[in-house]
Image: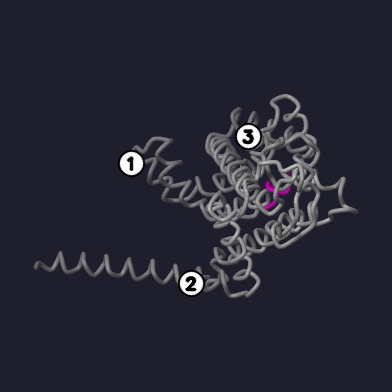
Amino acid sequence: MSQANVTADQANALIKANKAKKRRQFFKALFSRKIVLVSACIVMLIILVAVFAYQIMPFDPNKPAVRERNQGPSATHLLGTDEYGRDVLSRIIIGSRVSLIVGVLAVIIACIIGTTLGMLAGFFGGFIDDLISRVAEAIRVIPQVVLAIALCAVFGGGIVNMSLILGISNMTVYIRMMRSQVMSIKERDYIMAGRLQGNSNGRLMLRHILPNSVSPIIVTMTQQIGGTILAEAGLSFLGLGISTPTASWGTLVSGGRAYLLTNPVYSIAPGVCIALLVICLNSLGDGVRDALDPRLRGEL
């Protein structure tokens, strides 16, 4: 084996060792606080429940049973039944899937649209920057719930429409963040070197600028999922989001408010699930933010 091959093998081994060290530092910083570890376990449990919903729910969530309607918790129905005799626990389990899908999909849509527009605004500047910034400011001044209600009135509810609506209302965060990131990165030496080598603008943005902006994007996405799920629940509670008979946690809270005195578990149980998931997602987002901070990892 030649000296060049030995040197290349040593360099690859060193690179792998550095990557493994960074991963260990990340997870050590992420789970340094017990509340983040507990939050991550709860979020993972809810995700598993959503993934295997049809395997673990005890009853058909959409099958009515008139003779068993408005029952309280019992050995047969652990959380009771609703006004149509449907098992509340089964509807909460299947509702977790709907709420998570809407929350994650909306954040992905907001990230893709907002990151793209913010990158274009920060990289090219001038008229493109002014146009995108003015549109983002116009959307930003409208409260999210008001904007979502207006868009729901135009496009209707449903999982896909709700994801698009909440994604559009959340994209301004990514536009502002990505614009500021790009404006600070595009003047660095390696970007100037890439220009001198003849790299196109698209290649510079996708291969050099975007990878160096991943950390704040990940943190923002993690922190936004909880708020988006809460927004979906609020819109469904108002009757503008997910419509019956599709079960989501928001529609369950809305359906059970008329029976708070006779069957409080019907409305309280999905409300507790919403609060628990949002709190855990926010705690996990704070943990990811701290773990991605190089000062806390000891790199600065």
Q: Which residue is mark 2?
A: 25
Task: Identify the amino acid type marked 1.
Answer: Gln
* Left or right placement of residue 84 versus residue 14 in this view: right
Nearer to me, 174 or 129: 174
| Residue found farthest to the front | 67
Where is residue 126 drawn, in percent x and y? 59, 31
The residue at 61%/44% (across/down) is 107
| Tag shown at residue 197 | 1
> Nearer the observer, disc 3 or disc 2?
3
Which badge, 1 or 2, is on the more N-terminal residue?
2
Q: Which residue is mark 3?
A: 164
Nearer to me, 141 or 192: 141
Query: Based on the displayed image, in which of its 4 quarters is residue 14 positioned?
Result: bottom left
Instruction: Write down the region rendered in magenta.
Output: 226-231
Q: Residues within 10 Å of mark 1 (few under 14, many from 20)?
A: few
Where is residue 100 drawn, in percent x and y? 61, 48
